[in-house]
Image: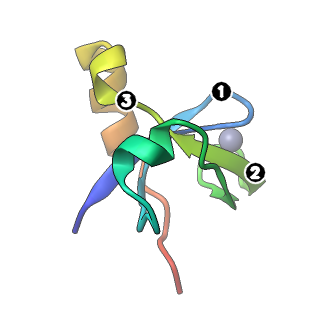
Amino acid sequence: MNRTIVRCQSGALYSSIWIPMVSFKAARLGTSRFQRCPVHKRWERARPVDPSTLTADERAAAERIEDIGIP
Ligand SMILES: [Zn+2]
């Protein structure tokens, strides 16, 4: 399963199944998605984060938090 690290509108990082309709490069340029945030337990806008901009600790923490996925 391909998971992408995303950041919610409140700033939390988590990993999400992200099935882009466009390339990841294009997604980084502005695609965001409305989905349930597993950190704040509410619907929030999230967008993919370039993992190379994160520290190893941030990446590891984000990978431990996974959303439930698409039902
Ligand atoms: Zn959130």
Q: Nearer the viewer, residue 51 or 58?
A: 51
Pointer 3: what residue?
50
Disc 1 element: loop
Q: Going by the image, does 4 lie left or right of 26?
A: left
Q: Counting residues from the N terminus, which is met first, the one under dot 2 or under dot 3?
A: 2
Q: Is residue 55 above or below residue 8?
A: above
The residue lying at 73 percent from left, 36 percent from top is 9
Q: Mark 2 CB in 8 Å range of ligand 1?
A: yes
Residue 65 location (% of width, % of height): 42, 46
Pointer 1: what residue?
11
As drawn, the label of residue 31 is none
Q: Mark 1 CB in 8 Å range of ligand 1?
A: yes
Q: Three-letter amino acid code at disc 3?
A: Asp
Comparing labels 1 and 3, the label whose residue is closer to the camera: 3
Disc 2 element: strand
Disc 3 element: loop
- Which quadrant of the structure image shows residue 66? bottom left
Distance Cα–Cα, label 1 vs label 3: 14 Å
Comparing labels 2 and 3, the label whose residue is closer to the camera: 3
Q: Nearer the viewer, residue 57 or 19?
A: 19
The residue lying at 30 percent from left, 12 percent from top is 55
Q: Three-letter amino acid code at disc 1?
A: Gly
Pointer 2: what residue?
44
Estimate how packed mark 1 is, as few (under 14), some (14 to 19) or many (20 or more) residues with alpha carbons within 10 Å: few
Q: Counting residues from the N terminus, which is met first, the one under dot 1 or under dot 3?
A: 1
Residue 35 location (% of width, % of height): 67, 62
